[in-house]
Image (cartoon, rainbow, N blue to C red):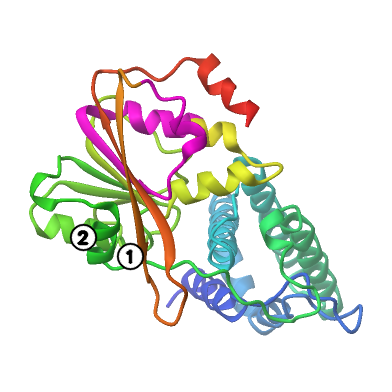
Amino acid sequence: MNTKNKIFIFINNLYKINARTNIFYELPKNDDFPLGNYVAKYIIFHEKELNNYLNYIDSVEINDFAKKVAGYSTERTIKTVIKLNQYVEVDAILANKLYDLYEDFMVKVIEKLYLNGSINFAWINRIVMEHQLKLRSILGTIDELRIFSNTKKFVEPIPCSEYSVALQLRILDINIERIKEPILDFGCGSKATLVHYLTKLGLEAYGVDRITNNKLYTIQTDWLNYELKPNYWGTIISHLSFSNHFKRTHFKMNGNYIEYARKYMELLNSLKPGGEFYYTPNLPFIEQFLSPKSYKINKNFLNYDIQENREPLDIMSVRIEKLIKATIENEQQIQALSIY
């Protein structure tokens, strides 16, 4: 196995080790590493191998290598924090800050190795510590991560369940025999269980989510960034996903509700005439703005014990049918949402 692959395997293992480590934990001593000194030890131990690799490749390949490590580390960090709390939102600005942080670290280490041929243990310890403290500062700007206590070394992730196909269809009151294609599961979950079930039935179905384990029939992206084609989808499904996050941001003091409102209207606009949008929970604060000439709203009040040993949840599912070729509602209608 070559050096480059070994480094990416190490990074992957590092994230597994620190998956639940609390970077905000108040350390007993100032010289303790928030995420451990695994990186410093790895670089010192593999110093000769890293040197040989850097001397073997040219400057263009070195630059490309640094960027790939920075990109992969950024991606893994974002996935890790989302798994800790599903409501974490990482915009382009925050993602770029993370990328710049990892790239800066890589450049410092590469330059030190390339110019000096060796690395002092005290120097790499200082660089790693500075890097982790900067990372803590960046992640500290995320509201949903600050809920974790700084008195605990490890955190308990906010639950994010992926429900069975049968339960999703039952709650949303979807009749497979009359479902319209193509189908989009907007917030399909990492396993995309419903998408794969539908495709096995011979239906044209796709899923979108921020984390997807199986790339077949799924797209990994932030749903706010996903481009929706007008008048394209026969059915859109959002079971405790996009609509759940929309409802939460509606109640959040600094919530991104305008962007969610725009995306909600884009989802409706992307339906074919006669197409249907199934979701739960309901969103009365925006549903009230929909024109009855363009959309027909059906609601079902349900009560299911979704998980064993828990109180039954009161759930209202919604089915919105697009009646005509409606365009995205004008900006005034979207801005009207600011009154709630």
Viewer-nearest residue: 251 or 14: 251
Alpha-carbon span between mark 2 and mark 1: 9 Å
Which numbered disc covers residue 191? 1
Mark 1 residue element: loop
| Quadrant for the C terminus in the image | top right
Residue 189: x and y in percent read: 38, 60
Amino acid identity at mark 1: Lys
Residue lying at the far right in this picture: please name it. 30
Please give the name of the residue rendered at 66% of the width and 41% of the height, measured from the top-left corner.
Answer: 93
Mark 2 residue element: helix
Residue 283 in magenta?
Answer: yes
Residue 70: x and y in percent read: 60, 56
Q: Quadrant of residue 183?
A: top left
Label 2: how many residues lie within 10 Å, few (<14), some (14-19) or many (20+)? many
In the image, taking residue 126 as reference, residue 89 lies left or right, namely left
Amino acid identity at mark 2: His
Q: Quadrant of residue 19?
A: bottom right
| Residue 91 visible in rendering | no
Contact check, label 2 and label 1, Cβ < 8 Å = yes
Please give the name of the residue rendered at 66% of the width and 80% of the height, measured from the top-left corner.
Answer: 42
Which numbered disc covers residue 196? 2
State the extent of the magenta-drawn residues as a range. 262-291
In the image, taking residue 218 as reference, residue 251 lies left or right, namely right
Q: Is 228 placed above or below 305 here?
A: above
Residue 243: x and y in percent read: 45, 46
